[in-house]
Amino acid sequence: MNCKSEFLKKYMTKVSNDLPSCPCSYPTEVAYSMADVPDPSTRRGFRWKDASGPKEKLEIYKPTARYCIRSMLTLESTTLAAQHCCYNDNMKLITRGKGVGTPNLISNEFSVDFHYKVDILPWIICKGDWSRYNQVRPPNNGQKCPDNPLDEDYLKQVEEALEF
């Protein structure tokens, strides 16, 4: 479970091919229930649910994020993974930095405990250093959304992470 696992790198390749791309804007219909959102890169629709509630602890794991969504498992899924995408106050995808969403190797829809062990504990082991964590779990920007946050804010976040 270290941050440089070869198995993890191989599995992440499979996961990235299996998961939808993050929408560039928060799909507001997910705030009230699950919603189908088309993914232009795969030409398929995926079901998403809101992942912004108190149980998600965004203030700890995704600071700067106001909203997050998580893809749901499908019959076509070849992994147990889920895409996790986070958005700022303006409902724009966070593409980098401490608030960015990263793929979950194990969907909490499959097992909350296993998700905690495989997705949350490595973040804790990395001591919350999102820059190290995101090297191994790269965030998705398959729809080529604009960089968010802007360079100045992002560089401040990188500096803070390195000083942590």
Image: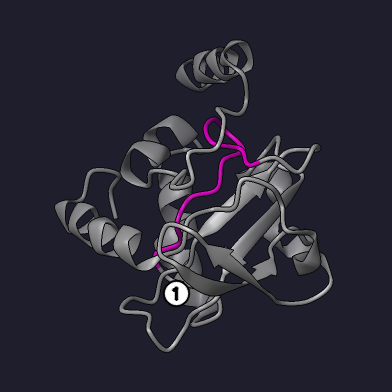
Q: Nearer the viewer, residue 115 or 21?
A: 21
Q: Position of residue 7 (x, y in %)?
A: 17, 59
Q: Looking at the picture, does residue 71 appear above or below residue 126?
A: below
Question: Which type of secondary structure does the marked residue at label 1 adopt?
Answer: helix
Residue plotted at (57% across, 30% down): 146
Residue plotted at (70% across, 40% down): 92
In the picture as drawn, the residue positioned furthest to the right comes out as 32
Q: Amino acid at mark 1?
A: Phe
Q: Nearer the viewer, residue 144 or 122?
A: 144
Residue marked by disc 1: 114
What is the magenta range? 93-105
In the picture as drawn, the residue positioned furthest to the left comes out as 6
Residue 22 on the magenta span:
no
Q: Is residue 69 left or right of residue 130?
A: right
How would you classify the magenta stretch by its main secondary structure?
loop
Q: Looking at the picture, does residue 6 appear above or below residue 112?
A: above
